[in-house]
Every structure is written in C-alpha cells, then in structure tokens.
C-alpha cells in the first residue's frame, strides 16, 4: 500500500544513501516527459526536505531545460536487494551551476568528477513509498567508469564545446541556461 510523507524520515534517508541507482523524471506541459537513470556517488540528502544530485555531462540536458521552463521534478529509488521498497520524491527542482552563489556549499557534499556540469536540487514537497515486490533482485551492481573516462579524455575545453553543441536545448527545443553560462559568470537558474 502506498503511503505519503511530508518529509524524509531517518529510515528513508538511510535507504536513499544505500542505493546505487536512482531515476530522474521531469517535463513541461508542452514537452515529452524525460526519465533518466543516474548512478555513482552523486545523490545526497541535505535535510528532511531537500535532496541534490551532481549531474555529469551527458548526451542531453533535459532536466535543466525542464527546470527552467517548469520546475517539476520526481526522483525514484528502488531496492534491488532483499528488502523490497520503492521511494518517490516529488517537488520542484533548480539547477545550480559552477560559480553560482550556492555552488561551493553544495559541491562540498560530493566527490570531484570529471565532466561535472551542474547540481540539481530538489525541494521535496512529498515522498511516497510503495512495496516494490515487482522489482527484481540485481545483486552485485558495479559502477560503470566509461562516462568519467570519456570526460577525463576530453578535458574541460572540449567538454564546454560539447555542451554548447549538444546540451543547449532539450529534444523538444526548450532552451536551458547551462551552456549560456559557460565562460561567463554563472548564476543560479
């Protein structure tokens, strides 16, 4: 049976910290809904109402565009171990770019990764748990290193060019400010 919560409990915070993968969903009234898997040591619970994840340069940047044009954001985590559970976090997100006033404070929560693009912060308005009985076991999950190796091989200048060419707008043509901010004083979106 699904249950809703107005804030994250200590047990839910511990569950989030133990997961190896999470999923991010965003969209606008006019766009497709984007659903992306995320992994690595990139998700943090900041308090009972706030989570953040370190976003690494990838093939697209849908979430940033959706945050600029709508702001609604959902994160989902599910257990692939012995104790089944699904946890969804609903709320509104914002993008924090390198150089923004909150950057240093937020970045201190994460390891340093080549290709770091931004931090997505979710103000959790509600959390929902459900059983997760239909989620399969997937023991032995290991992180992939290819994305970080790719970013390390490119270097910062080539990554900035890649983001300008490939991350300037969403698949539905929605712009985001991530690329515009590169090379100039970045601001919070």
Image: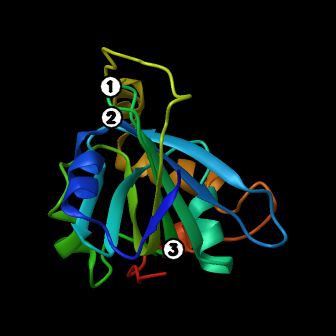
Is 20 drawn above or below residue 25 in the view shown? Answer: above
In the rendered image, residue 30, in percent from the top left (x then y), is placed at: 85, 70
Disc 2 from disc 1: Cα separation: 8 Å
Q: Is residue 131 left or right of residue 83?
A: right
Q: Which is closer to the viewer, label 2 or label 1?
A: 2
Is 173 drawn above or below residue 101 in the view shown? Answer: above
State which tag comes first along the sequence, 2 or 3.
2
Q: Residues within 10 Å of mark 3 (few under 14, many from 20)?
A: some
Residue 10: image tag: none
Instruction: Specify the farthest residue to the front.
Output: 1
Who is closer to the viewer here, 157 or 31? 31
Q: Which residue is mark 3?
A: 91
Is 37 drawn above or below residue 61 in the view shown? Answer: above
Q: Is residue 176 visible?
A: no
Q: Is residue 4 left or right of residue 34?
A: left
Q: Residues within 10 Å of mark 1 (few under 14, many from 20)?
A: few
Q: Is residue 68 visible?
A: yes
Which quarter of the figure has residue 168? bottom right
Q: Element under label 2?
A: loop
State which tag comes first along the sequence, 2 or 1.
2
Q: Is residue 71 left or right of residue 89?
A: right
State which tag comes first along the sequence, 3 or 1.
3
Residue 143: image tag: 1
Q: Are marks 2 and 1 in contact (CB under 8 Å)?
A: yes
In the rendered image, residue 61, in percent from the top left (x then y), is placed at: 59, 55
In the rendered image, residue 175, in percent from the top left (x then y), is placed at: 70, 71
Q: Which residue is found at the position 28% from the left and 55% from the top?
A: 12
Residue 20: image tag: 2
């Amino acid at each position: 049976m699904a249950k809703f919560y107005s804030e994250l409990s200590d047990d839910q915070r511990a569950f989030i910290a133990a997961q190896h993968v999470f999923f991010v969903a965003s969209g606008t009234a006019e766009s497709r809904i984007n659903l992306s898997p995320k992994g690595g040591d990139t998700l943090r619970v900041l308090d009972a109402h706030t989570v953040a994840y370190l976003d690494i340069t990838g093939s697209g940047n849908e979430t940033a565009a959706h945050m600029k044009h709508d702001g609604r954001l959902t994160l989902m985590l599910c257990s692939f171990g012995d104790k089944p559970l699904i946890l969804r976090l609903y709320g509104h997100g914002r993008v924090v770019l390198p150089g923004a006033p909150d950057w240093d404070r937020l970045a201190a929560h994460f390891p340093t990764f080549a290709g770091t693009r931004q931090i997505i912060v979710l103000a959790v308005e509600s959390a929902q748990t459900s059983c997760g009985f239909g989620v399969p076991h997937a023991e032995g999950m290991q992180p992939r290193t290819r994305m970080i190796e790719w970013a390390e091989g490119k270097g910062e200048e080539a990554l900035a060019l890649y983001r300008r060419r490939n991350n300037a707008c969403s698949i539905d043509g929605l712009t985001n400010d991530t690329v515009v901010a590169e090379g100039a004083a970045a601001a919070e979106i």
